[in-house]
Amino acid sequence: MECGFQTCLFTSGLKKRWRKVVVASGSKPQERKRRYFATCSRGIGDILGAEVKTMVTENVTTVAASGVGFEGDQETGYRAAMCLRTAMRVLEEIGYAEADPFDVYRAVKNSVDWKAYLGKHQTFTVSVRSSSGGDRAIRTRVKDAICDALVDHTNARPLPPSSPKEADVAIFVSFHDGELTIYRDLGGESLHKRGYRPPTIHASSLNETAAAATAVCAGLAKSGSSGMIVDPMCGSATLLIEAALLKLRIAPGLFRTSYPFEEWMDYDSAAWEVVLEQAREAEIEPSRVLEENSFLGNDIHPAAVELARENVDRAGLSEVISISEGDVEDLRVADGISVVLSNPPWGLRLADEDGEAWKKLGLFLKQNARGGDAYLICGNGEATKELRMRADSKRPVRLGNVDCRILKYHVLKAKDPA
């Protein structure tokens, strides 16, 4: 499930202004303070904001439900694309104008020095989010404006990309209440596509950024958190993989072989090398993590177990995460469990007749996780009733087109016999 360009871009409280990056003909854009916006699933903006401040920059300008604005230099943007676990996209603002829907063409053409961002043979795509609707018509006007601006400079109309994924520059436009903001996307494809899962996955699979947010909610980003981390219904093992990557401090961007910005006209290879080197140096040896934590996944379906093991192997975590096959009601864990992470079936996602999976999960928690905490994802409030436990906290989060909750349950310790 991918959460797209969210309405927080429209309501981020940006002051009205007219900006244009002025660049001498044929030169690269001058180094300047750049404005960025990182998008995320609605409901985890505060988590992403904390990530930005910790991993990228203290210069945060906006924290909204589904995105975070911040400022910095070119290296700041590269670092955000490399390090942010809960961000879907990292966007750099390249233009702004005030316009009505019929004036979009002029505003787009005149508010950006397009020849500084698109070379003669480079391709681009355009995505639009408008609070007033009419996205398709606005998108056409934006494309025409960019093409005509480039024709004025090169006398040649840009060719379309062979596919949207192959475009050299992905352009995003936010249009709200007469304010038009133009961005370019540093990642191209959504950053939740780390690269350790196959291109085609089950429609019910949890996306990586939501899994990372759940692991952060569980406190796994904090140093000193120890104990066994278990997903008794692990599916493709995304939750466990993201939890392990968090504990190992492996930057999610290291799985990517390339980024679109490496082909941009103003690409700074030296700044990118600094970001890459810092990301590699931050990693922790698995043996050090395994001294305090162990990771166990389990699933009843053989195909899911096979996929989970493949994903774990592709993520380079075979020595860290163990995957077993069996029914959750038969799973016994000898060592004490400190954290349970799981995305059990909840009807809209996967069939769960009579809430049987949640009944079994509740029994598992009471038999194996006494004194521990469970962080469960659910998009059906009726399903959780079968757990027969009261949630300590509920975090609303929008995953795809479904309103979900990240639920925290503390499993009470067994009472001493009288």
Image: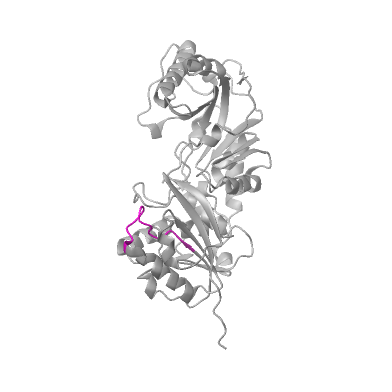
Closest to the observer, 366 or 354: 354
**Can residue 248 be seen?**
no
Question: Most extreme residue toward the bottom, as rendered?
Answer: 418
Front in this rendered view, residue 29 or 274: 29
- Please tell me in which quadrant of the rendered image residue 82 appears: top right
Give coordinates of residue 291: x percent, y percent. Answer: 58, 70
Q: Is residue 107 above or below residue 251?
A: above
Find the magenta span and give its range: 341-353
Task: Where is residue 222? Give x, y as percent.
Answer: 62, 59
Q: Is residue 402 magenta?
A: no
User: Is 254 located above or below residue 114 in the figure?
Assistant: below
Principal SS element in the magenta part? loop
50 vs 7, nearest the viewer: 7
Q: Is residue 378 among the parts visible in the rendering?
A: yes
On-image quarter of the C terminus:
bottom right
Q: Is residue 349 magenta?
A: yes
* Farthest right residue in view: 58
Percent coordinates x, y for residue 373 in the rendering: 54, 66
Q: Residue at x 60, y 43 (%)?
A: 275
Judged left or right of residue 311, residue 44 is right
Q: How many marks?
A: 0
Side of 221 relative to 109 (left or right): right
Q: Is residue 356 left or right of residue 281?
A: left
Residue 310 location in percent, x, y? 37, 58
> According to the image, what is the colour scheme of the structure?
one colour
